[in-house]
Image: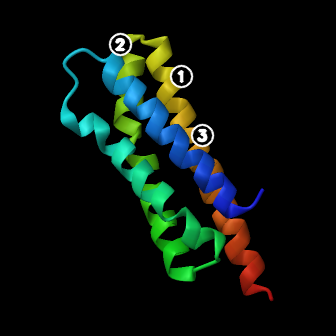
Amino acid sequence: MKAHKASLINSLVLIIFGIWGYIDSEGAAITALIPVALGVVIFLLNKGLKNENKTISHVVVLLTILVLFGLAMPLMRRVGEGDIMGITRVALMMITSILAIYTFVKSFIANRSK
């Protein structure tokens, strides 16, 4: 899978599941929308990824890593509450972020070896 496709999938998952989680959580803080906002930014930068812009690629990887680490606390909170649907949503966002990071690292290594 190409990095821009993995990043597009990741951004859409962050947006859709992030909004779903915000709506589903009663009294959720506005900070719960941070993954959604970063997903929108990653989505908007996807054209630059498709054009293989190195600067945009590095920015998107940084944002994806921030999202991944930022989702650790919500995951722990959902586990503590025993919220299976919440755990599934957050875990899926983390899995797509890990997949996107993996494809970026793979493409960076391939480009370096050329």
How crowded pointer 2 is (Cα within 10 Å; few <14, some 14-19, many 20+) is rated as few
Task: Find numbered disc 2 in the image and state the secondary structure of the residue it sits on.
Answer: helix
Residue in view at x 77 percent, y 77 percent: 110
Whole-percent x and y of residue 76?
38, 28
The numbered mark at residue 81 is: 2
Q: Tell me the distance, in whole angstroms, between the alpha carbons under discs 1 and 2.
A: 13 Å
- Residue at left offset 35%, top offset 13%: 81
Q: Kindly identify which residue carries mark 3.
A: 95
Q: Position of residue 44 (x, y in %)?
A: 46, 60
Tell us which disc is closer to us: 1 or 2.
1
Horizontal and vertical percent position of residue 67: 42, 49
Sooner in the amino-acid sequence: mark 3 or mark 1: 1
Badge 3 element: helix
Mark 3 / mark 2, whichever is N-terminal: 2
Circle 1: is it few (<14), some (14-19), or many (20+) Cα within 10 Å? some
Nearer to me, 49 or 85? 49
Residue type highlighted by circle 1: Thr
Residue position for label 1: 88
Camera-side mark, 3 or 2: 3
Is 68 rendered above or below residue 46?
above
Q: Residue at x 42, y 12 (%)?
A: 83
* Disc 3/disc 1 C-alpha distance (Å): 10 Å
Question: Which quarter of the figure is the N terminus placed in?
Answer: bottom right
